């Protein structure tokens, strides 16, 4: 980056600062990860210069011989990785992917039955402040007292409301969803079934969790979470919906694809097809389970009764009398980055909720295993219990930096 250093020292310094933060800190935001240096090279490449509206072999502008190679590889690898009939790799990210999918198969005013945000759903699954909620009528289903989706209730709602789409998937729910049951309910009421697998795409690619792809008409995802690719989105679907999805992505919703990111996706999909990725995905599940059990041991209330995936949702307010915001700040001070998060039907506000969400995909990429997770759980507990003691927080911070040093990332980057 010597050219950037000379030309724009302010931006260069900020990037170097962020690199140091990532190297010395423990990234435990459940949706974040560290991409490989090969992915970084692809997304930092000259492919960013090209416009390529359309699809391989059917573009609106000339000069596509190499871009078509890149996008075709990304599509073929995505289909192989997930056993999908059709893949569209152009969505810029997860929220656009969901809008593209809705727009492909629904009309304004149609009803979507989706998971309530505070019960683990996602903003784009019907939060009133989103564009999708202005266009479609969302109805939210919830989890029961044991933290499971109440499928009987969901079926009753579906029969009563007759939605055009039933949507599953989440950003803070930690249990395995019964794909077959949801798809069967959708079929019964004549609704399209859609699954947003953004959070668990890497676990599915690595065969550490079962795949929703055979069961749902449409499956959307981001490519940058557990899947460890560049920041971006993707839509997989049954052949029957392929034309509608492609038309909805372009020209329906987006302009030219970001070809450099499409290349990064192709590189990441090839990485995810390797045996090492399956090992990685399995280790994520093991690490999250240890995190759950250790935090329970320290007296934390784990929402939904525990975890089957890569993260835990913790009611820190009920457990330790510390709010989600206070816990986030305390953990930031020791170099562990997490996010405050609502718990189901949270009585507190979204900006200072009762919970925090903690995930292990990024630290698992660094090579951390059960032993490290035990230590990290101890630090989390100590920091939250002593959130007002700058001295104790500083002490723990030193230990966090030292452990991160033993699991280096991006050693030769800048
Ligand atoms: N922001 C992502 C997450 O953290 O889950 C979802 O969009």
Image (cartoon, rainbow, N blue to C red):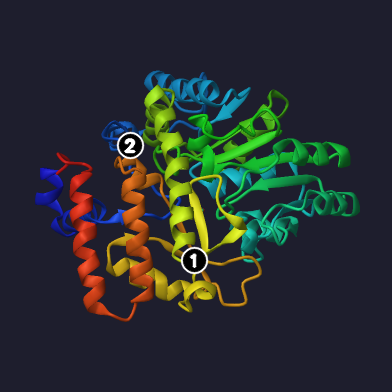
Q: Residue at x 26, y 52 (%)?
A: 22
| Residue 93 position within the rendered picture, expressed as x and y whole percent measured from the top left | 49, 45
Q: In this view, which residue lies farthest toward the right?
A: 160
Query: In this rendering, is residue 397 above or below 35?
Result: below
Query: In this rendering, is residue 156 above or below 315?
Result: above
Q: Residue at x 83, y 50 (%)?
A: 152
Query: In the rendered image, which quarter is residue 190 located in?
Result: top right
Q: Are marks 1 and 2 in contact (CB under 8 Å)?
A: no
* CA distance separating discs 1 and 2: 40 Å
Q: What kind of element bears circle 1?
A: loop
Q: In this view, which residue lies farthest toward the bottom?
A: 388
Q: Residue at x 32, y 63 (%)?
A: 379
| Residue 195 position within the rendered picture, expressed as x and y whole percent measured from the top left | 65, 41
What's the mark number on residue 300? 1
Q: Nearer the viewer, residue 347 or 100?
A: 347
Question: Circle 2 sits on which residue?
Answer: 43
């Amino acid at each position: 980056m010597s050219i950037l250093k000379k030309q724009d020292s302010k931006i260069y310094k900020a990037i170097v600062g962020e690199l140091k933060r990532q190297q010395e800190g423990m990234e435990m935001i459940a949706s974040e990860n560290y991409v490989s240096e090969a992915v970084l090279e692809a997304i930092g490449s000259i492919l960013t210069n090209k416009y390529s509206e359309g699809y391989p072999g059917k573009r609106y502008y000339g000069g596509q011989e190499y871009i078509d190679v890149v996008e075709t590889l990304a599509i073929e690898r995505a289909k192989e990785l997930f056993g999908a009939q059709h893949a569209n790799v152009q969505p810029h990210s997860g929220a656009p992917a969901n809008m593209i999918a809705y727009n492909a198969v629904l009309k304004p005013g149609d009803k979507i039955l989706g998971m309530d945000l505070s019960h683990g759903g996602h903003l784009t699954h019907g939060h009133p402040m989103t564009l999708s909620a202005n266009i479609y009528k969302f109805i939210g289903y919830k989890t029961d007292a044991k933290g499971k989706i109440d499928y009987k209730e969901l079926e009753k709602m579906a029969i009563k409301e007759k939605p055009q789409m039933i949507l599953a998937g989440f950003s803070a729910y930690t249990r395995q969803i019964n794909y077959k049951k949801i798809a069967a309910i959708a079929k019964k009421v004549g609704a399209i079934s859609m699954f947003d697998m953004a959070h668990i795409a890497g676990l599915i690619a690595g065969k550490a969790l079962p795949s929703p792809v055979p069961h749902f008409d449409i499956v959307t995802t981001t490519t940058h979470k557990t899947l460890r690719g560049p920041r971006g989105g993707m839509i997989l679907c049954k052949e029957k919906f392929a034309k509608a999805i492609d038309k909805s992505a372009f020209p329906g919703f987006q302009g030219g694809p970001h070809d450099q990111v499409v290349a990064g996706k192709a590189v990441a999909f090839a990485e995810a097809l390797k045996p090492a990725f399956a090992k990685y995905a399995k280790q994520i599940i093991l690490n999250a389970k240890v995190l759950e059990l250790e935090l329970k041991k320290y007296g934390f209330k784990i929402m939904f009764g525990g975890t089957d995936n890569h993260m835990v949702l913790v009611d820190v307010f009920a457990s330790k009398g510390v709010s989600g915001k206070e816990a986030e700040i305390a953990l930031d001070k020791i170099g562990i980055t997490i996010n405050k998060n609502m718990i189901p039907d949270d009585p507190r506000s979204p900006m200072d909720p009762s919970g925090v969400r903690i995930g292990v995909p990024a630290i698992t990429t660094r090579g951390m295993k059960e032993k490290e997770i035990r230590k990290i759980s101890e630090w989390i507990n100590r920091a939250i219990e002593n959130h007002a003691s700058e001295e104790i927080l500083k002490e723990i911070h030193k230990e966090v930096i030292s452990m991160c040093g033993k699991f280096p990332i991006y050693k030769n980057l800048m």
